[in-house]
Amino acid sequence: MRDKSAHIPLDHASVSPIEAAEKLRAFKEQMLKRRTVREFDTRPIDQALLDDIISVAGSAPSGANKQPWTFCLVQDPSLKSQIREAAEKEEFENYHGRMGERWMNDLKEFGTDHIKEFLKEAPCLIVVFKRIYEVDEAEGKQNNYYVNESVAIAVGMLLTAIHLAGLVAVTHTPSPMNFLAKVLERPENERAFLLIPVGYPKESTLVPDIKKKPLDEIRIAY
Ligand code: IYR
């Protein structure tokens, strides 16, 4: 049975088709300029910007509105260097056998290796944790729903907000990444999901010349 007692009117601004087309055209043009960047300027980020970025991510839809995420903002140099050290240790193993030949070949055009200088240079690391369950005083462990889907949507919105704020980021996937919960002393119900260094790009940064699939390849009209 649906309980509608706590419902409120939708706050919805209607947009004419012409206005929508223009808004979307401008948004698309801006979003197509988003690139993963691995070279950062050390210039700090305004704290209010970071808070707004996290608030945008926190507005994402989630299973039963459980909001199963925690965004850790790491700016302390000592914590950053602990994270870098642990990440490079795992990545060394990945780049020296664990990833295999095909994977190594696929990564060639990106020029990545186990050295992760961006974990030091980027002024802020956003470490995203998914919350597998909540602990209820009376009921004990209560699993959250569609946790991966929910947190992935929130991260998409986070990356969009980072881009709109004129900042750049790399969606870093050190693997395994359980060291992040240890370094940041996160509770047992949280698992590291992604490590996202954020900042301003280093001057004259080059990025790989990659292309996105054209619309015809990603859209099938029925
Ligand atoms: N996790 C490693 C390797 C890596 C894997 C993929 I798939 C990438 O798109 C990029 C890197 C790293 O972060 O270097």
Image (cartoon, helix red, strand yellow):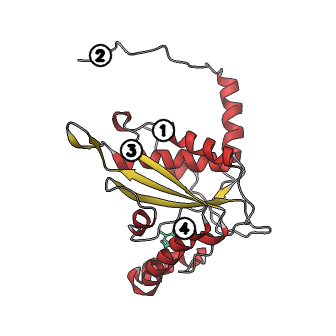
Task: Say which amino acid is labelled 4.
Answer: Leu
Residue count near mark 1 (Cα–Cα under 10 Å), binned few <14, some 14–19, many ≥20: some
Q: For the residue marked with disc 3, what is the amino acid?
A: Pro
Residue 142 in the image, given as x and y percentages of width and height = 24, 42
Residue at coordinates 40% horizontally, 38% vertically from top-left?
62
The residue at label 1 has a CB less than 8 Å from ligand 1: no
Image disc number at residue 3: 2
Tell me: residue 122, above or below residue 63: below
Q: Is residue 125 above or below residue 22?
A: below
Give the Cα distance between marks 1 and 4: 28 Å
Query: As drawn, is 201 to the left or to the right of 160?
Result: right
The secondary structure type at the circle numbered 2 is: loop
Closer to viewer: mark 1 or mark 4: 4
Marks 3/1: CA distance? 10 Å
Question: Which element carries disc 1, helix, strand or loop?
Answer: loop
Three-letter amino acid code at the position of disc 2 = Asp
Q: Nearer the viewer, residue 16 or 150?
A: 150
Question: Which residue occupies the foreground of this view, 11 or 90?
Answer: 90
- Numbered circle sitting on residue 79: 4
Q: Which mark is residue 60?
A: 1
Residue holding disc 3: 68
